[in-house]
Image (tube, grey):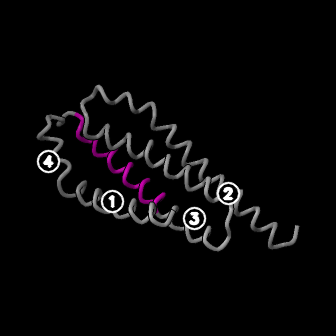
Amino acid sequence: MLVAGSLLAALGVALGAYGAHGLSLMLESLGYQDSLDSRMAWYETAIRYQMFHALGLLVLGVWASSIPSPWLRRAGYCFLLGILLFSGCLIVMAFADPRWHKLGAVVPLGGLSLIAGWLAATVAAAGQKRAESGE
């Protein structure tokens, strides 16, 4: 989780910098002037969620190193899958021909995976709390 979180955060910074400095020109050169705002918004959302969950993976990695829990592993896998489906599909949609916009149907599955990751982390936290209180 620490390695994946670190790499995804580094990639998020690099992609964010590209989005701020070169993305609109590239999209215009591809002929996407009419949908530039939507594509920029998809890209920005993808990178924002990638960064949040890369940081989440780092937190899970540190947490799991002190308290091994299958729920923390599950949360990490859910975050990885969610980043791939949610952020990955949005990034592809930002760059690709409109025929690829059907990937928009996959994006909510990525969102559900991210939510499942947070719920798995909640179960891990509740279990840790019970263990600490002796229940």
Give the structural element (helix, strand or loop) at label 2.
helix
Which residue bears the numbered disc 1? 11
* Separation (CA) of disc 3 from disc 2: 11 Å
Dot 3 and dot 2 residues touching (CB under 8 Å): no
Question: Is residue 50 in the magenta section?
Answer: yes
For badge 4, the amino acid type reads Leu
* Separation (CA) of disc 4 from disc 3: 37 Å
What residue appears at the point 63 percent right and 59 percent down from the top-left corner?
A: 72
Q: Residues in magenta?
A: 35-54
Question: Is residue 20 in the magenta section?
Answer: no
* Separation (CA) of disc 2 from disc 4: 45 Å
Q: Is residue 41 toward the left or the right of residue 131 in the image?
A: left
Which residue bears the numbered disc 3? 60
- The outermost residue toward the top is 99
What residue appears at the point 41 percent right and 33 percent down from the top-left corner?
A: 104
Comparing labels 2 and 1, the label whose residue is closer to the camera: 2
The tag earlier along the polypeptide, 4 or 1, is: 1
Closer to the camera, 49 or 79? 79
